[in-house]
Image (spheres, rainbow, N blue to C red):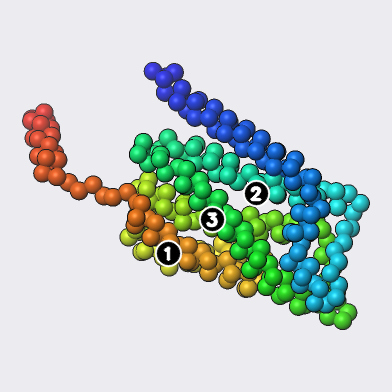
């Protein structure tokens, strides 16, 4: 009995290990491909900052340590590898949680993987094309005749990668909440009732993830508010429907109660 109880858990850990290995391989392949275009990728990544700096006529970045440029290109390649491997990463994640679904629900896994990639790319694109230009203009606005902005490669990459990944993952909110509703963990009335707490959590989370300025915080919190409403709609459509008691069930319950009463007597 003890061996039978431990075997499913051991198999679960083995499946987790296999899926992590496949995910690391996918990221490694993406990294190897991205490294061949590291300079071009870094140029694309810094384009919003360069455009904002060109207004002042000083569109140049620096590196303060000899190996900084080398390691920055490595990290850019790793970031690109993760983004390229997102279809595999999301597939491995959803396949790992699929045993908790019914057989008829597993047919939705492929569309869910596609939507996961779509929302991640949508979030990262929103951060890159919308948040970055306005955010950089705000930060560079503190430059004066005697104070000049000289961003380094390492600091910019750390900021940009964190922001892109953060926006990519927070845009997964509709899928996560819809999946939780499908599993019966949350309901539409629960989501509606706690809407005000969710909005407060969005602004607090945005303040922790984004830089300490109001603009980027609001630009992350506002899309989350819209995504939360989409999540409620998704939970309404795909959420688990409550099981209505039938007369047969009531009769069975009454019979069970009668049997229990007789047994007690």
Which image quarter: residue 4? top left
Residue under numbered circle 1:
229
What is the spatial separation of the Cα atoms under label 3 and label 2, in whole angstroms?
Answer: 12 Å
Spatial distance from mark 2 to mark 1, Cα to Cα? Answer: 27 Å
Residue 230 vertical position relative to residue 29 in the rendered view, above or below: below
Which residue in the protein does label 2 denote? 83
The residue lying furthest to the right in this view is 66
Please say whether residue 175 is visible from this viewpoint. Answer: yes
Q: Circle 2: is it few (<14), some (14-19), or many (20+) Cα within 10 Å?
A: many
Residue neighbourhood size for the residue with mark 1, other residues' Cα within 10 Å, grouped as few (<14), some (14–19), many (≥20): some
Q: Quadrant of the N terminus?
A: top left
Percent position of residue 176, x then y: 47, 51
Mark sitting earlier along the chain (3/2): 2
Q: Which residue is mark 3?
A: 119
Mark 2 or 1, closer to the camera? 2
In the displayed structure, would residue 6 be above or below residue 16? Answer: above
Residue shown at 74% from the left, 59% from the top: 45
- The span from disc 1 to disc 3 (Cα, nearest Å) is 15 Å
SS at mark 1? Answer: helix
- Is residue 189 left or right of 264 when viewed as pictured? right
Q: Label 2's element?
A: helix
Disc 1 versus disc 3: nearer the observer: 3
- The disc, 2 or 1, on the residue closer to the chain's N-terminal end is 2
At 76% from the left and 67% from the top, the residue drawn is 49
* Mark sitting on residue 31: none
Up the image or down, 252 lies above or below 204; here it is: above
Quadrant housing residue 168: bottom right
Report the front residue among 44 and 161.
44
Mark 3 and mark 2 in contact? Answer it, CB < 8 Å.
Answer: no
């Amino acid at each position: 009995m003890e061996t039978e109880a431990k075997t499913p858990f051991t198999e679960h850990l083995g499946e987790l290990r296999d899926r992590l290995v496949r995910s690391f391989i996918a990221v490694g392949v993406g990294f190897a491909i991205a490294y061949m275009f590291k300079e071009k990728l870094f140029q694309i990544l810094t384009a919003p900052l360069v455009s904002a700096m060109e207004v002042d006529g000083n569109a140049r970045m620096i590196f303060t340590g000899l190996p900084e440029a080398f390691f920055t290109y490595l990290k850019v390649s790793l970031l690109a590898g993760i983004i390229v491997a997102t279809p595999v990463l999301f597939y491995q994640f959803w396949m790992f949680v699929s045993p908790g679904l019914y057989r008829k629900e597993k047919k939705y896994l492929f569309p869910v993987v596609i939507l996961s990639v779509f929302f991640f790319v949508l979030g990262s694109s929103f951060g890159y094309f919308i948040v970055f230009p306005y955010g950089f203009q705000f930060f560079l606005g503190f430059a004066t005749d005697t104070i000049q902005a000289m961003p380094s490669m390492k600091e910019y990459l750390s900021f940009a990668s964190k922001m892109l990944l953060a926006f990519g993952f927070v845009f997964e909110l509709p899928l996560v909440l819809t999946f939780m509703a499908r599993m019966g963990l949350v309901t539409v009335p629960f989501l509606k009732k706690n809407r005000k707490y969710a909005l407060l959590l969005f602004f607090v989370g945005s303040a922790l993830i984004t830089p300490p300025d109001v603009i980027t915080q609001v630009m992350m919190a506002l899309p989350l508010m819209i995504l939360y409403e989409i999540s409620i709609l998704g939970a309404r459509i795909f959420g688990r429907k409550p099981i209505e008691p039938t007369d047969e069930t009531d009769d069975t319950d009454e019979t069970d109660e009668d049997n229990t009463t007789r047994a007690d007597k």
